[in-house]
Image (tube, coloured by chain):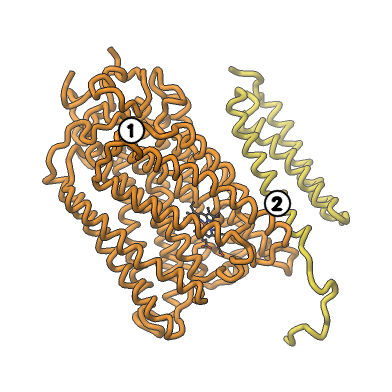
Chain colours: A yellow, B orange
Amino acid sequence: MIRAHVTGTKMLVSWIALLVLTFISFGISRVGLTGGAELAAALTISIVKTFIVLFIFMHLIEQRFANRLIVIVTFLFIVLLVTLTAADPMTRKTYPKTPDPSARPID
Amino acid sequence: MDPRGVGATHPDYMRAESGVRSWLLTKDHKRIALMFYGAVITFLMLGGIFALILRTELLTPETTIIDPMTYNQMFTLHGVTMVWLFLIPSIPAVFGNFVLPLMLGAKDLAFPRINLASFYVYVASAIIILTAMVLGGADTGWTFYVPYSSTSPTAVTWMGIGIFVNGVSSIMTALNFVVTTHTLRAQGLRWHRLPLFVWAIYGTSIIILFATPVLGLSLLLVAADHGLGLGIFDPRYGGDPVLFQHLFWFYSHPAVYIMILPSFAVISEVVCTFSQRPPASYRAIAYSSLGIAFIGFFTWGHHMFVAGMSEWDAGVFGGLSMFVAIFSAIKVFTWVATLRGGSIAFSTPMLYFLWFLFLFVFGGMTGVAVATQSLDVHWHDGYFVVAHFHFIMVGGALTAFLAAAHYWFPKMFGKLYDERVGLLTSVAVFIGFVFTFLPQFLLGNAGMPRRYYSYPPHFQWLNVLSTGGAWLLGAGLILALINLVVALKWGRRAGPNPWGSRSFEWITSSPPSKHNFDVTPIIERTPYDYHLSEEDARARSRAS
Ligand code: HEM
Ligand SMILES: [Cu+2]
């Protein structure tokens, strides 16, 4: 069952969108946002790009739901991977908070 | 009907066409399965030779036969060969390929050409990995941990690319199985009538589809760090070495279920056939495979308790890891309950089932033990861990592979192997196994680290036991192989259904004809209807 057709124009527009997004993420990395903002921005942009690639270039938009489901589940797994992995550096603790300079090995 | 089975009026798939070309270009899932069979056994032997060299080196505390650098490369090669060239493809690519379409009443897999391609991609990956070996191999262990792997002077890049290509092959096979199960089931074969083998192979395929790309990505990143110095895992450039472990284990913990779920698939069939009983609970076995596939994705962090991972993450992962044991226990109890009141035949596959049960439970329990953070801090990177994963992977996956090799031998080749030799080799494999790996638990607990070339002299007697066991295990495997090869030529003819099974793959002749069935079957029963006579069961599973 075909729902929507991916036409040449749509492809071109999506391609340009991808390029623009790439430049934006490059730009953001130059600005030097603080806190988690840079990470959040980069992730958001890549999620948007992923969906463009999946739905337009891989023609997922033409598929029925059962076939899209597998992609949705895959996406959830990636969310899981990123969340648990990001939770690790965010919850790491170093003791003592400021390392004792005299404890450094001599190199 | 023909007593030789449905389809016996046509020549069997091995004789349907002849010539090397007809094999190399075949699109028949059964022939492709046999080609995988040959390849996979070759790599099992290669990996086995590496293992015996390693074990022989450890016979004495100091140098025995090889130097330390060779030792490092050899354990890497052993791990890589065994994991990616044997364990992961073994049961799915050989027995999955062969019997899954038969069980579904299908003529072939959904994409026969992709199936053939997946074989060649597998061969290509093997060639790349072998090339890497010739170019000096790698000395990182099969886990490729950074920062060592990104600086090691050995052929890490090649090895990584080989494994990447190997992943492509297993993704192709998995995709084929998923689509086939969805679209090519015979009329009347509803989901709840699927053989348990199919359920477990389906679960395996799902894991492969979700996990393998992450492995491919992480190995490419290591290769990039190694070759181009990108610094993704290098703190000097803002990278994080622990990130590599997150990515690697996000694949590799599920990968252990890629190796063990197919064993569950085989075991479920063997139990039912040789006790002539339906499973104690069909749904428990079927759904727990999916449960394992799912939960298996939440546990990878238990490999990183001492890697500098945060305590918070470690706690979460430790807790989640223990959930998997629940699903495994459901399976084990259901298999055992199936035996109750059955008329049990102690033939070779059934004997392998018993070894499987013992070794899997033992290995699984030690898994729960090492998933306990406080204990793992002591055991990590020691022989206890080596023993744990060999109990599961060799004890579980290899015994199931052997069970399958014997169980489906008559189906694949139309011959019977010698039962007494089968039983004897099975016992040899078990005893060899126990002598190899049981001492390693003791060694690990006493503090012997893994991947070490040398050890203090008081560890020697346990190492001698382990090495002796390894040689016995090797001998048992060779004998089993000889037994099957001899049967290929001189074995007695098997009827279509020598074990009296009710599963669908036994409806057709043995060996099956090229297109599996000459009438498309219509299925009006489950694959475990042992209350029906064989005649009735047959009548309810073919076109009238
Ligand atoms: C089901 C089949 C299983 C297989 C095939 C398997 C396989 C493995 C392998 C290959 C390793 C070693 C990885 C390395 O080289 O570092 C390992 C380690 C480990 N396994 Fe399993 N495992 C299984 C089940 C389990 C279960 C059920 C648990 C927990 C409940 C578990 C917990 C662990 C832990 C915590 C380690 C890390 C130990 C350490 O490095 O200190 N495993 N397992
Ligand atoms: Cu694990």
**Residue A10 in view in this figure:** yes
At numbered mark 1, what does the secondary structure look like: helix, strand or loop?
Answer: loop
Identity of the residue drawn at 16% across and 48% down: B418
**Residue B116 in view in this figure:** no
Q: Residue most toward the front?
A: B341
Give the residue at mark 1: B277
Which of B237 and B389 lies nearest the eye of the viewer?
Answer: B389
Confirm or deny contact between disc 2 and disc 1 (CB under 8 A): no
Give the residue at mark 2: A84
Query: Please, is residue B432 above or below residue A95 in the view?
Result: above
Query: Please, is residue B80 above or below residue B36 in the view?
Result: below
Q: Amino acid at mark 1?
A: Arg
Residue B393 lies, in percent from the top left, at: 43, 56
Quarter occupied by the N terminus of chain B: top left
Quarter occupied by the C terminus of chain B: top left
B345 left or right of A107 in image:
left
At numbered mark 2, what does the secondary structure look like: helix, strand or loop?
Answer: helix
